[in-house]
Image (tube, helix red, strand yellow):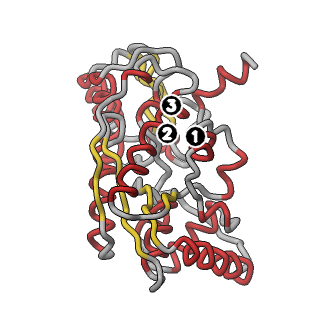
Amino acid sequence: MQEFIFQTPIDMTENKTDRLDTILNELKTLVVAFSGGVDSSYLVYHAKMLKNVKLIAVTIRTPYIPKREINEAIEFTATHGIIHSIIDVPFQEIIRDNPVNRCYLCKKILFNKIIDFARENNYRFVVDGTNADDKGEYRPGLKALKELEIRSPLAEAGITKKEIRELARKEGLSIWDKPAMACLLTRIPYETEITEGVLKMIEDAETLLFDKGYPGTRVRVHEDIARLECLPGFIEKIINDPERELIVAHLKKIGFRYISLDLEGYRTGSMNSELKKND
């Protein structure tokens, strides 16, 4: 797992968690859009600790969400006694060609499903795990959430990603140092037709790398090339890995012709670099 160093003043974090409690208590009944990541995991766990809050965690299952994420979401809620429901959503043709506004379109579709679920089950609000840091990044999906009036308690309380990890660690949650994860569509260049076969190749490749000791590695696809983005500390490791040739052979067996290692390593939204060039 990644190594995280925390320097957040405890009193500052406590003030923010007080604000979080106030927000959640005001909402009272809510559906948490639960991906199984660190942010939504901490949010749903913390909300469950509040006596006056009624909640249910809802996870969307689609062809472009890794099965590992779904299984970990199921395991987390079962471990902590959190009511959990899964909504199956087929691949939406409107994002088949991976348009530039894909994230916006996808969030609109998926969160409308969750809103319908909330209404049908008498929950007043839908919330998600957006944190205070997300507001400063290129995240077109946030526009969709705003339009749909989705609440983001962690962001509203001013809690950052680093603070969430520290709070989760203090609570003894095993996911506190879990690497960030995004949907598999982020591994494919914009304006590229997406097939279920390519999605399976990406998922199989990332699962292999996870099992070989490289969690959080992204497999970015450029036609028949797999470009690996590793977390800090893993680049030198994979270069010197005695199993490197075996890993390459497995990735080629999955269907990739060439395997490249990106020396810049993992960075959020690396596929957005072309958009910035065209601005």
Label 1 close to label 3 by CB (< 8 Å): yes
Marks 1/2: CA–CA distance: 6 Å
What residue do we see at 62% from left, 36% from top?
Answer: 140
Q: Which residue is mark 1?
A: 144
Query: Is 232 on the left-hand or right-hand side of 178?
Result: right
- Seen from this angle, which residue lies furthest left? 253
Q: CA distance from mark 1 to mark 3?
A: 8 Å
Q: Point out residue 255 in the picture as x, y percentages from the top left corner.
A: 28, 20
Of residues 214 and 268, the one nearer the viewer is 268
Question: Which label's residue is closer to the chain start, 1 or 3?
Answer: 3
Residue 7: quarter of image: bottom right
Q: Amino acid at mark 2?
A: Lys
Residue 207 x %, y %:
31, 42
Residue positioned 42% across, 23% down in the render? 226
If the image is split into quadrants, where does the N terminus sit?
bottom left
Give whichever of discs 1 and 2 has the lower sequence position: 2
**Residue drawn at point x = 58 percent, y = 58 percent:** 151
Assign a secondary structure to mark 1: helix
Q: Secondary structure at mark 2?
A: helix
Confirm or deny contact between disc 1 and disc 2 (CB under 8 A).
yes
* Residue 37 horizontal/vertical position (percent): 45, 56
- Residues at badges 3 and 2 in contact (C-beta under 8 Å)? yes
> As shown in the figure, which amino acid type bears the numbered disc 3?
Leu
Residue 107, numbered circle: 2
Pick the front one: 125 or 130: 125
Q: Nearer the viewer, residue 134 or 21?
A: 21
Q: Residues within 10 Å of mark 2 (few under 14, many from 20)?
A: some
Quadrant for the C terminus, please: top right
Bin the neighbour count of mark 1 within 10 Å (Cα to Cα): few under 14, some 14-19, many 20 and up: some
SS type, badge 3 = helix
Query: Residue 105's mark?
Result: 3
User: Compared to 142, does 53 lie above or below?
Assistant: below
